[in-house]
Image (spheres, rainbow, N blue to C red):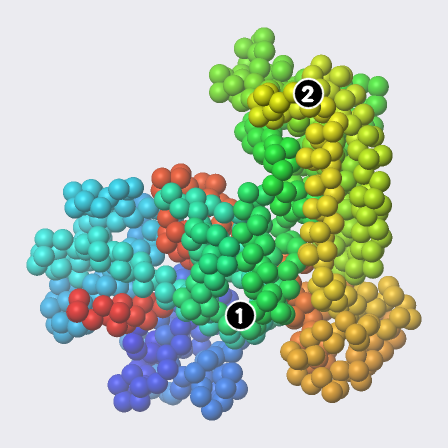
Amino acid sequence: MHNCCAVPNCSSSKFDPGPLFRFPHDPERSKTWIEKCQRQDLQDKPPDQLFRCYRICGKHFEATSFQNDVERSVLKEDAIPTIFDAQSQTQNEKVKRCKETDETEVKGRKKIKKSQPEMSKEDIQSLSEEDEYKEYLKSLFEVIILLGEQNIPPTKPGDDKQDGFKSSNFQALLEYRMTCGDQALKKRYDENKECCSLTCLNQMIEVFEKHIHSKLTEEVKQNGFFSLLTENLVKISGEWCLPVFIRFMDQSDCQKERFLGFVSFEGDGDDLAEKILSEITDKWGLDMEKCRGQAHSCSGTHFSKFKTFSTKVVERYPMAMLTLKSTCTLNASLANGMALSGVQLVLSILKKIDSFFSQSSLLQLELEHAISIFFADREGKAKELREICQTSWTGRNDTFEVAAEILEALLLCVDSVHDNEDMRWSDEVTHGALEISRALANFEFIMALVVLKNIMTLTQAFGKNVQGTVIDTHFATTSLKAVLHSLQEVSDNIDVYHEFWTDEAVNLATAMEIPVKVPRSVLRKHQSQSGIIRPEIYYKDHLSVPVVNHIIKEINNLFSENHLRALRCLSLVPAVIEHQKSAEPEEESVQLFKTDIPNAASLSAELHCWWVKWSKKVKGEITPSSLHQTLQLADVKFFPNMLAVLRLVGVLPTLALENGCNVAYKRFQMYMENTPDRFKSKSLAFLNINYDIGYDLDALVEDYIKTYPDRL
């Protein structure tokens, strides 16, 4: 069925072999294809099964249906078959009476998807040895695909022994298929007393990964430029791994992100940076010359390694500018990069607080009740804080400010839960409350929180704007100098500011009955030394000064002149042109991409025409207010340079993705949160997150045979 045309009585596969095109995934287009070729017997089949099992050859499409009229190898997204002969139409009556018997596709973890009807025992016997082997491989790949989609571990941890592998999920699904009539597997089992060995399974997963990587790389190449994104390190099978994503603009001019996989993060310095780059370019096949941005999430302990890597990328590929990541607020990103014990203490406790209160709505209500008690005389403030706490407030741009405001109410809440006077809470909950209570009753935590709150107030508005609407982002690029000036003023007068922050922290600690002291680990280190370590001196040298210096340095790194120029190109968005009134977009900023646009010589003239079009727009004409809306304009095709620049800006990691475009990141989060550590697998995670890549079962089989010809 994969190798013949679905049009009744079409002889192309017999006498005129040519390209076969899958039925589309889209239900409406798939239905139209069925109607056009008059295959009434296919109407009840789901689009997913039609996509995997049925093809229509190129002779049924007009020349205008192809992206390239000469090669005719790629259909346009809206292509519809329209060319049919009379014989194929009358043959449809026979097809109606002789429906193919396909196994109904079964969804869910406990049932297996079929990409084609099961072959009978007679059909298997009539196949050549090679075709028989291919049918067998298809069955194995279908099981692997199901395992990947449903995130079912093929084997148990430590199933490297034959006895353990025989009882694995993979083997259980193979047995189920044989029970349901899979003759290819049944014959293999009868001959060898096993369907598949553990070695063969690992080889097939390896081939599957390479196949998906080739698909991803091809998708990126078709769409030009991209940005590289990494997430926080994760530990899988005892190894620190770096999750790598890629952002690009697809052929419909929409932002898109894909998960590329994991890179081992073992090692240090330049060697580690070289290893990561080698993996990305040599193994995954990315052309880093096309990289126009990079963004990294990291904790303070690994910050230096990430800095080495990002610096190495910029040195080798100057246009791959370092940027902020849209999935993390500026203030959170700045704090995460500080390898200071006090800052990391605050961040870890905030994570515990978020995890603790998210486990039960009753705990959330308990916190809101504590806020109401503490702010009894300020109902407006109490209402505002309760509403904030109903959201994921630990990920906000003003996290540290909110935490400082509710700190006393928070301690009141966890102490009440821990006391458990009315016996409402389980031992697990009360133990969690005790841990948080002890963490909050720590002057190092309070001092670090106060310092972060006061310094981050200076970057809060800028961070919110730069990750806000297009107009806000464009405005933020002009306000950065003021932010840096304020931070520098604090740095120059750090003695005065630190004194204010110390007083605030001491007053808060006194109200919470917490002793003012330096960390216990510091006291132990200096117990043999004479003299007393004064808290105000210690926290100035080990907290206030390094925090201010880090923020100034990191903002300068994140918002280089090239990054700001790229963001200023948002002035091409019609809403910004309208907002700017008479000011034309800055050509100097657009010139950043002069080597990447179709015709740099006509840039000035085209830029002026674009400005005239939107500054003198027709009354009643809707003004696009976002990058996505602008790129979807039909008129933008008549401005090739503007289109190219807007697409290049779209790949910057700083800009938030449109709703529905960040599915890869969400799937990654779901996999990491919902998969127990002992079942986590780099390969399975990669297959699970990229299950919608549009793999080709026949191509998978061919790739496996080419890679391991000895098995055939």
Q: What number is the disc on residue 266? A: none
Q: What number is the disc on residue 531? A: 2
Mark 1: few, some, or many residues within 10 Å (few <14, many ≥20)? Answer: some
Question: Where, by quadrant of the figure, is residue 157 drawn?
Answer: top left
Question: Where, by quadrant of the figure, is residue 693 drawn?
Answer: bottom left
Question: Where, by quadrant of the figure, is residue 225 drawn?
Answer: bottom right
Q: What number is the disc on residue 288? A: 1
Callout 1, which amino acid? Met
Quarter of the picture containing the N terminus is bottom left
Mark 2: few, some, or many residues within 10 Å (few <14, many ≥20)? Answer: few
Front-lying residue, 464 or 297: 297
Front-lying residue, 411 or 87: 411
In the image, residue 341 lies at what x, y percent? 61, 34
Callout 2, which amino acid? Gly
In the image, residue 294 lies at what x, y percent? 60, 61
Residue 376 drawn above or below residue 209: above
Secondary structure, mark 1, is helix
Residue sitting at 76 percent across and 58 percent down? 473
Discs 1/2, front: 2
Residue 60 drawn above or below residue 42: below
Q: Is residue 687 left or right of residue 380?
A: left
Quarter of the picture containing the C terminus is bottom left
**Does residue 203 appear in the picture of this structure?**
yes
Residue reaching furthest to the right: 582
Secondary structure, mark 2, is loop
In the image, residue 409 lies at what x, y percent? 71, 21
